[in-house]
Image (cartoon, helix red, strand yellow):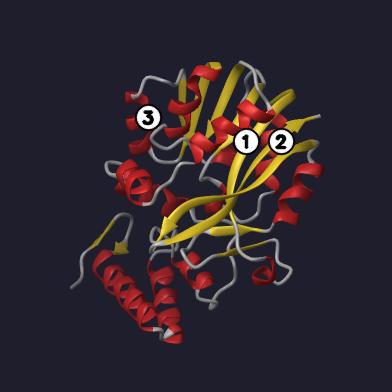
Amino acid sequence: MAEEKDGGIDEEALAEAYNRALTLEKSGDYEAAASAYQEVLRLDPDDHGGAAVRLASIGRGETPPKAPDAYVTTLFDQHAGDFENILVDQLGYGVPDLVRKALQKFAPGNYERLLDLGCGTGLSGETLCDMAAHVTGVDLSENMLELAEEKDVYDELYVGEVVDFLESVETDPYDLVTATDVLPYMGHLEGFFAGAASVMARRGILAFSTETLPTETFEGRPFMVGPHQRFAHAEAYLRGLMKENGLACLAFRPITVRHEQGKPVRGHLVIARKL
């Protein structure tokens, strides 16, 4: 009899189904892989393994509005300890430094209050903390926040999903809001942009990064799940949402977000000002 734990999830059956799905996906048998991923979702409706995102990435399921919270939390809790080594040293991630340089060029000056959304272990906070008098960080992963706290660059840290935080927080406005390596785990961005604009001071700055794909790949879609199970966003979608939420675009630059399997992952670095 397989063991059941964690609120009734049959962990043994779940692991077997997930490993089978991965093996089938890697072999190119997407139909069989899709059936296995559907079994994963039946066993674990909260989707700690991100099966819904994988289904979308192989074209066998609807694109979800975002990566499941349970998946994001599990992913980053598990990898918190070696997160910076993997992301920075192995994958060549350097977006926080790119944000700093872009801010110095397009929106220079000292900021009073910085909100670092999806702060993780504090890479952006560490890079930008000297530009702000007060720094707040938000992340779903408690393990990541523990590491961020050790850097002693944040005045406040909150455990929570980014949009939920933006919609519920009651605080003084922020004049700099950052979101680096956050949007690739979100599809629909209406709530993100509305929430960010709502907590920003007048003439405040929003700095964020995205991942993207060639225009023809989107086939008119505003976003889609890319080959590495993260969301890619079309430029027109981002520009439209900024305009709808009273954000004037100061910079929209193509960047290499990271390297994956030896190839560059393309994206955008965007700086916008609240009107």
- Reading the image, the residue beneath label 2 is 272
Q: Which mark is residue 173?
A: none
Report the residue that reaches farthest toward the left. Answer: 1
In this picture, residue 136 sits left or right of residue 163: left
Q: Position of residue 187 (x, y in %)?
A: 61, 56
Q: Position of residue 45 (x, y in %)?
A: 44, 63
Do residues under tags 1 and 2 come within 8 Å of each other at their CB atoms?
Answer: yes
Residue drawn where x is 59% and y is 59% of the image: 232
User: If the image is split into quadrants, where does the C terminus sit?
Assistant: top right
- Reading the image, the residue beneath label 1 is 207
**Which class describes the residues within 10 Å of circle 1: few (<14), some (14-19), or many (20+)?**
many
Judge whether residue 159 can be spotted in this image.
no
Residue drawn where x is 65% and y is 29% of the image: 105
Question: Front-most of 246 and 5?
Answer: 246
Q: Amino acid at mark 1?
A: Ala
Q: CA distance from mark 1 to mark 3?
A: 20 Å
- Reading the image, the residue beneath label 3 is 148
Question: Front-most of 215 and 3?
Answer: 215
Q: Please, what secondary structure does the residue beneath circle 3 have?
A: helix
First reached walking from the N terminus: tag 3 or tag 2: 3
Do residues under tags 3 and 2 come within 8 Å of each other at their CB atoms?
Answer: no
In this picture, residue 119 sits left or right of residue 121: right
Residue drawn where x is 60% and y is 40% of the image: 208
